[in-house]
Amino acid sequence: MDHFLKAKKYMRNDSGNRIRYVVSAVLLFNLCLLTTCLAASSSVVATPNNTNAQSITEKPGTNNATDVTKTASDANSVPDDTTDLSASDPFSTMTPVQDSMEGLNRATFAFNDKFDTYFWRPLANGYNLIMPRPLNRGIHNIFTNIRTIPTIVNDALQLHACSILHDTWRFSINTTLGIGGIFDVASAMQLEPYTNDFGLTLVRWGYTNSDYLVIPFFGSFTVRDGVGFFLDYFEFSIYPYLNPPSFRYEVYTLGALDRRAHELPFQSLLEEAAYDKYLFMRNAYFQHRAYEIQTNNERDCTSRHRENAISQINYFGP
């Protein structure tokens, strides 16, 4: 019996170690790729391209999949590399498309697309199929609440005082009254969710233009935003503090699966709209990111945020 228990414990530890090694290898590979691309982009001055996604008639939100679909009103409207939309695109002067690594990016994009088609998307479909809707929503709220932590840190790094108050108050309410974030109580109190990241912090302090980069398994970024993504994970999120490591990676994978599952309703529209899926996703990413940059620059201490902050401070008052 003792030998059986020891063998079972060994198999469990061995499985955890394998998960750890695989995830660590993926992260290490992507970090090496980012370092190489950062060195390349600093030594080669890329000529900005005027290509951007078509002008969005509705303001995009914080969900990437939702924002991409707003650019897909006409399948023939996807720009090619010779289209100049600077006159109609309000963000074109803000984020010129720089894609000096297009060959590498297209190869990585093709790999990610196959991975999504044959593994990740079916898994997300199965997740939505077996998960009861209330539980699905609760899990989504938990991960939205978890992502508020790096948002607060980046609010502080950007010296956005009102945003710090807004996001800290939202996190505190949902963590306590919302039972660890299961229920989004803060939104009912007009404290809307917002996502800030270290890529936006770098923009805030002057790193405005950056080359487009498709990262294996993770998707569309720029070199700047890719560096910010990994820094947010390793330095500002709760994940490095979750132990054992196998549990940490399981929680992170569940969060990634939750995000993919919530993007599924827009998949058919994306498939129909994209004449060239690579160009479509690249231009949509720059368009969405331009909006996030503009919103972040205008967000702090506007009259609306001051009023919201004051009203929430007095919410439980006399």
Image (tube, helix red, strand yellow):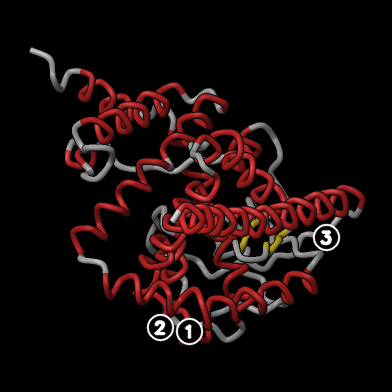
- Residue 273 vs 306, above or below: the answer is below
Q: Where is residue 239 in the image (x, y as percent from the top left)?
A: 51, 41
**Percent position (x, y) of residue 135?**
22, 58
CA separation, marks 3 and 2?
34 Å
Q: How crowded is mark 2: few (under 14 residues within 10 Å), some or many (20 or more)?
A: few
| Vertical comparison of 23 with 51: above or below | above
* Viewer-side label of 3, 2: 2
User: Could you tell which of marks 3 and 2 lies nearer the N-terminus?
Assistant: 3
| Lateral position of residue 120 relative to residue 18, left or right | left
Q: Distance between the residues labelled 1 and 2?
A: 5 Å
Answer with the quarter of the image where residue 125 lies: bottom left
* Residue drawn at x 25%, y 57% as measured from the top left: 137
| Residue occupied by mark 2 | 268
The secondary element bearing badge 2 is classed as: helix
The residue type indicated by label 3 comes to Thr
Q: In which quarter of the image is the N terminus?
A: bottom left
If you read the primary sequence from the N terminus, does the residue marked by circle 1 or circle 3 appear first? Answer: 3
* Label of residue 271 in the image: 1
Q: Outermost residue toward the right?
A: 43
Image height of 144 relative to 237, above or below: below
Question: What's under tag 2, amino acid-wise?
Answer: Ser
**Crowdedness of circle 3 by 10 Å Cα count: few (<14), some, many (20+)?**
few
Q: Do callouts 1 and 2 mark residues in contact (Cβ within 8 Å)?
A: yes
Question: What residue is shown with label 3?
Answer: 47
Residue at 17%, 18% in the rendered image: 314
Q: What element carries label 1?
A: helix
Q: Where residue 254 appears, x then y in whole percent?
A: 42, 58
Q: How many marks?
A: 3
Q: In which quarter of the image is residue 147?
A: top left
Residue 185 location in percent, x, y? 19, 39
Task: Specify the quadrant that holds the C terminus.
Answer: top left
